[in-house]
Image (spheres, rainbow, N blue to C red):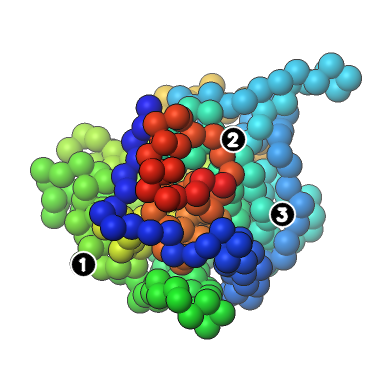
Amino acid sequence: MSRITIPQGYRPPLSGYEMQRAIEFIKRIFPQELSCALNLRRVSAPLFVDEASGLNDNLNGVERPVSFDIPDVGATGQVVHSLAKWKRLALLRYGFRPGKGLYTDMNAIRRDEVVDNLHSIYVDQWDWEKIIEPSDRNAAYLQATVRAIAGAIADTADALGVAFPGLHQHVSRDVTFVTTQELEDRYPDLTGSERETAFVREHPTTFLMQIGGKLRSGKPHDGRAPDYDDWQLNGDLLVWNDVLGRSLELSSMGIRVDAASLDRQLTLAGCDDRRDLPFHRMLLAGQLPQTMGGGIGQSRLCMQLIGTCHIGEVQCSLWDAATRDACQAAGITLL
């Protein structure tokens, strides 16, 4: 079912060849900026994990992972939704120390995604994670990290503008911080996504904090798995997208659950059955390091910095016939 929106008068900002050059430029420059800003090192990451390990990201709890049997191994593999849990275990296994972290190119398949201009069943992210001290589990440390990421994005945008003078997509490095409850209080009659667009229109780089728990209305702003982010110390990095005239989420991130917050959130989410999974047992026993981390969408960042109206202009995926026909009629090339 087509959910595509093509802004009136939109034309692709670059030719096919120049588009590929710009995508390569962003994917080369931004990881350098990010790793310097957060003290990260690149590592290799899995495309799939053992179903029994509990390492896959359950997202909102209803999405079905792509699964397949592996007869020679005697296990069932699951294509990752994200690497939120795997990264934390990897930091322990690879011997990282406080203040240092990792990043990786994460490729995922989300078969139940509702596709539109911003969403695809193929997900590509720079997933990152770093070890922190217990004393760093606070909003001030989270906000300082967000500012560093916003700076890395702005520096990449500036460099892209020099390399491709015809591109003029600016990203503000000045971040406004707001909680989901403050947003609900400000716009009580709007939906979650409508609140984001209304606020980000006025504050073009925003970090929306405290996602996952119920608000005073009795509903959460958005779903968030209970076993990776601490719902009081997480959030989404949102920017204003001039092409589509709406807010665009570039990153979801947060300080990760410790034993106490995991215990509390599993109960609140009705997911107590996960307590017996290997990853969760280690975390509840205090055997994993304190960390923070997140994912930054590669295709989303390319969309924002290049100025495309559809994510299919910067990544290869599958689209319904109506979307393909609408793009062809508008002169939009889907990769």
Residue 201 at what x, y percent from top left?
Answer: 23, 63
Which mark is first along the chain, 3 or 2?
Answer: 3
The amino acid pointed to by label 1 is Glu
Please identify, in this view, whether the residue under mark 1 or under mark 3 is nearer the observer: 1
Question: For this rendering, which residue is in front, 111 or 21?
Answer: 21
Residue at the (25%, 44%) spot, across then down: 192
Q: Quadrant of residue 283?
A: top right
- Report if the CB atoms under discs 1 and 2 are less than 8 Å apart: no
Secondary structure of the residue carrying tag 1 is: helix
User: Mark 2 highlights which residue?
Assistant: 109
User: Amino acid under label 3?
Assistant: Leu
Q: Which residue is mark 1?
A: 202
Q: Secondary structure at mark 2?
A: strand
Give the residue pinned by disc 3: 91
At 39% from the left and 54% from the top, the residue drawn is 309
Q: Residues within 10 Å of mark 3 (few under 14, many from 20)?
A: many
Horizontally, residue 184 falls left or right of residue 96, namely: left
Q: CA distance from mark 1 to mark 3?
A: 38 Å
Quarter holding residue 36? bottom right
Taking the spot 79% from the left edge, 58% from the top edge, the residue there is 95
Q: CA distance from mark 1 to mark 2?
A: 34 Å
Residue 177 visible in the shown view: no
Amino acid of disc 2: Ile
| Disc with the residue nearer the chain's start (1 vs 3) | 3
Are there few (<14), some (14-19), or many (20+) residues within 10 Å of tag 1? few
| Residue beneath the point at 26% across and 68% down | 203
List the single residue furthest toward the bottom: 162
| Label 3 secondary element | helix
In this picture, residue 330 sits left or right of residue 284: left
Residue 47 pos. (x, y %): 71, 39
In the picture, the quarter occupied by the N terminus is top left
Residue 49 appears at what percent x and percent y? 71, 33
